[in-house]
Every structure is written in C-alpha cells, then in structure tokens.
Amino acid sequence: MITDKNSISEYAVVRNSKIHNKGVFAKKEIPKGTRIIEYVGEKITKAESERRAQIQLEKSENHTVDGGVYIFELNKKYDIDGKVLWNPAQYINHSCNPNCEVEIIKGKIWVISLREIKKDEELSYNYGYDLSEYKEHPCVCGSKNCVGYIIAEEHWKKIKN
C-alpha cells in the first residue's frame, strides 16, 4: 500500500512486467522531459547504506530473499533506501535502451522521460552500475542493443571486447 502522497504519480502504475517480476507502466502518454515519479524512501548515511547492501547481498547469496538492493545515491553524505512500501518507483526496471533517466533536482531523485512515452509502455532507465562484479548482474531487458549485463553505457565497449 502506498502511503506517501509524494510517491503517487498521475503518470505511473505498477503492474507485472516481462522484464522482471513487477514494473512501472505509463498510465497515459508522457511528454519528453516530464518528471514522472520521485524515487522516495528512507534517507540514510553512506555507512548505513553499505551495511544494508551487504546484508541484502548475503541474504540473496543464501537464496533466502530476492537479491534486489534499492539504495540510490543522493549525494556525498546520504543515500535513499527505496525498499519501502510507499515507493512504487523501486519497481522501475533497468533497460539497455531506456525511455527514462534519473536526475537529482533540489535534493530529490526524479525519474524523467527521455522521449515521449506511450500509454501502457513500461518505464525503464539504465541503472548505471560500474564494472566491479558486473557478471553478478545479468541483464534480461530484451532490447535490441542489450549488452547482457546491467552496467553504465560508458562501460559497454569494455565488455563487448
């Protein structure tokens, strides 16, 4: 149940996804450059972020929970842990051919459309992971230019070679 009014979007709805379990879809046409939804959650320190991420990864290695870590870098001091009930943006999947990007605007994390998005189209952005342990993050986005791993576009040539 969504309880934070800031996380509700007139543009987005959570549904089952072909990419991975759940996804976020356009309720209506979305113009290019639209702030679609804010990525919300608990504001935590970098140290707490590392602690939580490590616990989640250990649980996933033991197959006791899904391996998803929903921590998003906010700034040099803080991150946002988006694994909360009131954050539907946590269900936006990665794509190697995304229709959205993420921007931090005045201390808030916004998902913004890169182009016009049609009603019922699944929203996606490139999670932008670095190369460390990239083989542990296979990509199943299904796009024509999928590189097979969830990594930032700047690293694509490195793994294609």
Image (cartoon, rainbow, N blue to C red):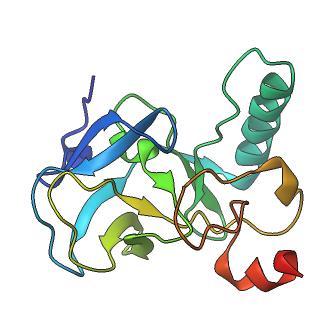
User: Can you tell which quarter of the image residue 159 is in?
Assistant: bottom right
| Rendered residue at 11%/64% (across/down) | 29
Vertical comparison of 57 with 148: above or below:
above
Vertical comparison of 113 with 66: above or below:
below
Percent across and percent down for residue 24 are: 33, 46
Percent across and percent down for residue 65 are: 69, 20
Vertical comparison of 16 with 48: above or below:
above
Quadrant where the image shows the C terminus: bottom right
Name the residue nearer the viewer: 77 or 25.
25
| Rendered residue at 62%/67% (across/down) | 146
Q: How many marks?
A: 0
In the image, 18: left or right of 117?
A: right
Quadrant where the image shows the N terminus: top left
In the image, 8: left or right of 147?
A: left
| Rendered residue at 43%/42% (across/down) | 91
| Rendered residue at 38%/70% (across/down) | 100
Residue found at the far front of this picture: 144
Percent across and percent down for residue 101 are: 43, 73
Percent across and percent down for residue 68 are: 64, 37
In the image, 78: left or right of 149?
A: left
